[in-house]
Structure formats: structure tokens, C-alpha cells
Image (cartoon, grey):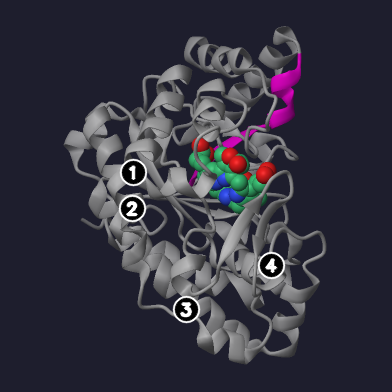
Amino acid sequence: MQSNNPTSPCAAPDTILDGSRFLRACLRRPVDRTPVWFLRQAGRYMQEYRDIRKHHTLVEICKQPEIAAEVTITAAEKLGVDAAIIFADLLLPLEPMGLDFEFQAGEGPVVYHPVRTAEDVNKLRTDRAADLAYVAKAIEKVAAHFQHRLGIIGFCGAPFTLASYMIEGGGSKNYIETKKLMYNDPSAWRTLLDKIVKVLEEYCRLQVEAGADVIQIFDSWVGALSLSDYRAYAYQASQRLVHAVQQMGVPVIYFGVETAGLLGDMASTGADVIGLDWRQPLDEGWAAVGHGHAVQGNLDPITLFAPLDVLEQRVHQILRAANGRPGHIFNLGHGIVPGTPVENVQAVVKMVRDFKL
Ligand code: CP3
């Protein structure tokens, strides 16, 4: 199922493409209108999600396919978007690798025994990715529900971003421990990334076999790296993961934040779609990515708190910058934050649907 175009090596079956403007846009095929979905479209800004969170922790929701599927479906239907991203978390693969973690209220994730030395890296297991089958089960349920009416997005963290959580033990401002391991023990760093890629490959395969139409790879914190460090320490592992997933027959969206200086290199991983944050105008970001790739983005998520006329102006600005070129997926530049008015998110969907150049 490989096409000859090296920047878009994936080909989905035409039956699926017919029903999915989202999938068509990932592959830069013409669409009737720009597809739209939102990073973190299921989450605390939505009452239905908060109601479920009263009874279950985040990890409990992820591990119960029935509930994870319900959260995924409810959010997509309530917003009227063109794609549903499976409800899961970036950190889930840490557990089968042997690292316990927890989400502490208001403080974000905490990993209990962070990876700091070559010995810690050697202890990590790569033989239990199958434990993540609960995510695949949730995808099966979402796929059965939507029957190709919406694109279904599976996801995982990128090797660098996942490594940064494993090493820092949580979120970080300066990535000191991560960079110390990179610079002080490049061999342990490489082994760590190899192990992560091995687990993520299998994890993505489970998701694709369960019905994910596309895989998004979140390199959320890669913007912490200089271009030369991206090339030396992160690019190769990302590229291997992108290619492995494309070999499974689905397109890949590769997303990061504060990546203006990295976009050309991120695109050369071969990812079909590059996610753009909001700091750069979309047309400039797309030019940096190269027009042989699709792009996704790039509204500032905090614009969702603005009055509707301001919001509409920003939405139109992005759509005009895309200029009808095939391969634009409307999205935010990063995730929806708690407190965002749901009706404004719905209004954006309508603005994108109604837009005419
Ligand atoms: O609708 C969707 O987008 C799918 C759900 C989703 C979650 N996490 C659920 C979640 C997705 C795609 C993720 C990915 C994820 N997880 C990323 C990459 C996306 C990005 O924003 O760049 C990252 C960095 C994580 C790690 C993580 N998980 C963080 C930093 C936090 C925030 C901690 C906090 O309390 O604010 C989480 C928790 C999390 N994951 C929540 C949700 C809905 C909110 C917390 C909750 O419900 O208790």
C-alpha cells in the first residue's frame, strides 16, 4: 500500500477515504471543506467529562475501554468535529516499561523513580507493550460506533517527549536532567530512545489494528531543544517511529510546540502532517514545513476565551492563510485548557464549516 511519494508514503483504502475529509486532508487530497478537530477535545472544560471524573481517576477512565470510548465519542459528537482522538494519556506506556506514575491534582504527572542513569535505562522493560491493549479495545468501540463517519486518531508520545517525562519525573521548565543524560551519557540516551521506540511501535500497531485511521505523535516538549540538539538527540528516533507507523498503512501527524526553528527537520522525518503551534502565521509555518506535507493548526487555544467577533477574525485569518491548499486540518496550536467555554469551541466548528474563501 505504499505510494511513490516519499513525503506521503501512506495509502489508506479508498472506501475509507471516501467517507473521511479528515483522512483525505492528511494525504493532501482535495476536500469539500477544511476538516476540524481539537487537541484535548475531551477534558476538564467539558461538563460530561467532569461528571465522569467525579467517579473515576484519569487512569481508571483510560483503562476501562467502555468509559474511554464514551468520553471520546461524547466529546466528538458534542463538538461536531471531523475526527475523534482516543481518550488516553501520553504516559500510559511508562507502566509496562516498569515506571509507576500518578496524576496529582493540580500538579500534573509524577513519575516515582525517574530514569537518571544507564543502570536505570537497562532496567526498563520492552516486552509488555501488549498490556496497553485496553487502549486498542477502546479504539475498537469508537470505530464500531462511528463506522468511518469520523476519522479516528490514535496517538503516542514522541521518543524525546516521553523520555523527558521518564527522566524529569514529571513536567519540566528547563529539562536539566534530560539534557544531562543526553550530554553526559549519549549511549544510555540512545538505548533509552531505542527502548521507547520499540514499545511505541507495538503500542501503535495495537491501535492501528483496532481501527485507528491515523496516528498522532506528540512531541509536545521538543521545542526545548536547539536545532543541532534536535538533530543529534531526537530526530532519528522520531523518524524511525514515523516510518514504522506508516508501514502499518496509516498517515502520521507529528506535533510539537515552540517548534518554529525545527519545522523543516520535523518534516524530514517523513510525517504526512506536521502540527503547528500558534506563534507563527500558518502560511509561514507551512512554508517552513514544505508544501509536500499537510499541516494541522494553529489557533491559540486561549483565543477561545475571546469575544466571538475576535475569535472569528482569528479563525478566518488561519483559513485565509491556508488559502484552500489541499492538506490543511484546522486545529488549535495546543490543547484546550480547563475553563474554556464549550460554546466557543462549537462556534469555531461552525466558523470553519461555513467559511468560504
Ligand atoms: O481529547 C484528547 O485530546 C485526548 C486526551 C488526551 C489526554 N492526554 C487526557 C488527559 C491526550 C491527547 C493526552 C496527551 C498528553 N498527555 C500530552 C500531549 C498533549 C499535549 O498537551 O501536548 C501530554 C504532555 C500529557 C501528559 C499530561 N497528562 C499532562 C501534562 C497532564 C496535565 C496535568 C493537569 O492536571 O493539568 C495530563 C492529564 C490529562 N490527560 C488530563 C486529560 C483530560 C487532565 C487531567 C484530568 O482529567 O485529571
State yes or no: discs 2 and 3 in contact (Cβ < 8 Å). Answer: no
Image coordinates of residue 179 in percent, x first then y, are 75, 76
Q: Residue at x 66, y 74 (%)?
A: 114
Amino acid type at image mark 3:
Lys
Q: Which SS class for mark 2?
A: helix
State yes or no: discs 2 and 1 in contact (Cβ < 8 Å). Answer: yes
Q: Quadrant of ligand 1?
A: top right
- Residue under label 4: 169
Amino acid type at image mark 2:
Tyr
Q: Residue at x 54, y 61 (%)?
A: 158
* Region of the chain picked out in magenta, as a range: 293-306
Q: CA distance from mark 2 to mark 1?
A: 6 Å
- Please tell me whether mark 3 or mark 4 is closer to you in this view: 4
Q: Residue at x 40, y 39 (%)?
A: 68
Image coordinates of residue 266 in percent, x first then y, are 58, 59
- Residue under label 3: 195
Q: CA distance from mark 1 to mark 4?
A: 27 Å
